[in-house]
């Protein structure tokens, strides 16, 4: 069973590695410029179709852009948004959780009620409001997702920190006069890191879906920069005559999120043997 699990993990990591390579080096290895339009070459089918061409392995879009090259460019956008948004929300949420869990009292109550207010606002409504005020762009998408995604980290770390603050090693550090920033860094943060790492791995897939959803609605990355969500939005108009324009970005989102979630679940089980597989 463990060998089978390790093989599945290796396969998931290999797939993620391919998408990571495509995102990082897509500008070098992509067969075409993803932003190059050719209206004389629109909606060409994939290479395995009778009228397909080996010049466009996955076909072309309604603007004559190469689908494979757009997928590579979209991988760069999705991975960049996921890593930056998760990083920002994670750092802020962990800081809030450490303060709330360690200080307790009214500070804890205020911070947790603010997080409850955040959770009560539907993500899409808050995203529309913020992007309407800031304007759609890659930077603003990262900020919007980070602003709406910190609560899970804060609540997780707050619970772990509240459990640790009365442990002997924390008491000894406090009695010895250790400044609280150093106490957080040396004694509390290392003991919540495992839980945070697992949450990060599981959160990356969710953020990729968020970014794709915003781009699908026209609130995310704007043309001519390709993204998987905007490719889906463009391809849905041609689903009956050119399925490849929406199928391949949808498959890319599905595969990446599935592999990330599998890796996160494997890590969760490995770090906590009591966890349910």
Image: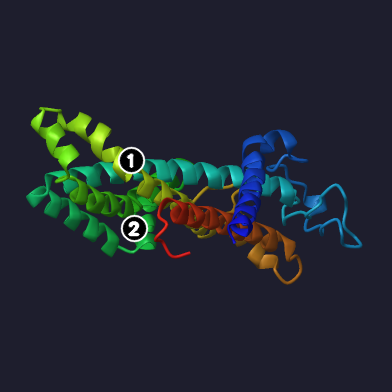
- 62 relative to 143, above or below: below
Q: x, y (%) of residue 22? A: 67, 42
> Label 1: which residue?
91
Q: x, y (%) of residue 139? A: 44, 41
- 145 relative to 275, above or below: above
Q: CA distance from mark 1 to mark 2?
A: 21 Å
> Label 2: which residue?
126
Residue drawn at x 38%, y 46% as measured from the top left:
194
- Which residue, as the protein is rendered here, is positioned at the far bottom? 240
Secondary structure beneath dot 2 equals helix
Q: Is residue 9 visible?
A: yes
Residue drawn at x 16%, y 41% as measured from the top left:
168
Q: x, y (%) of residue 257? A: 55, 57
Residue 219: give its label. none
Give whichever of discs 1 and 2 has the lower sequence position: 1
Residue 98 sits in which quadrant?
top left
Q: Is residue 225 visible?
A: no
Q: x, y (%) of residue 125? A: 35, 62
User: Is 89 displayed left or right of 253 in the figure?
Assistant: left
- 26 relative to 249, above or below: above
Sort mark 1 into few (<14), some (14-19) or many (20+) by Cα contacts within 10 Å.
Answer: some
């Amino acid at each position: 069973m463990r060998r089978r699990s390790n093989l599945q993990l290796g396969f998931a990591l290999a797939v993620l590695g391919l998408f990571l390579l495509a995102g990082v080096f897509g500008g070098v290895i992509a067969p075409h410029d993803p932003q190059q339009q050719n209206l004389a070459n629109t909606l060409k089918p994939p290479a395995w179709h009778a009228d397909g061409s080996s010049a466009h392995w996955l076909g072309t879009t309604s603007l004559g852009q190469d689908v494979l090259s757009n997928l590579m460019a979209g991988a760069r956008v999705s991975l960049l948004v996921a890593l930056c948004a998760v990083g920002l929300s994670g750092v802020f949420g962990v800081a809030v959780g450490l303060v709330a869990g360690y200080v307790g009292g009214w500070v804890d109550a205020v911070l947790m009620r603010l997080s409850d207010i955040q959770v009560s606002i539907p993500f899409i409504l808050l995203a529309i409001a913020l992007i309407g005020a800031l304007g759609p762009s890659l930077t603003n998408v990262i900020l919007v997702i980070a602003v709406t995604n910190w609560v899970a980290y804060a609540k997780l770390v707050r619970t772990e920190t509240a459990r640790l603050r009365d442990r002997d090693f924390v008491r000894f550090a406090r009695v010895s006069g250790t400044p609280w920033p150093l106490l957080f860094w040396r004694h509390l943060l290392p003991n919540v890191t495992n839980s945070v790492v697992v949450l990060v791995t599981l959160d990356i897939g969710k953020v990729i879906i968020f970014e794709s959803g915003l781009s699908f609605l026209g609130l995310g990355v704007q043309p001519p920069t390709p993204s998987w969500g905007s490719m889906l939005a463009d391809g849905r108009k041609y689903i009956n005559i050119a399925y490849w324009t929406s199928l391949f970005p949808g498959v890319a989102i599905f595969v990446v999120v599935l592999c990330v979630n599998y890796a996160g679940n494997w890590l969760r089980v490995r770090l906590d043997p009591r966890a349910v597989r």
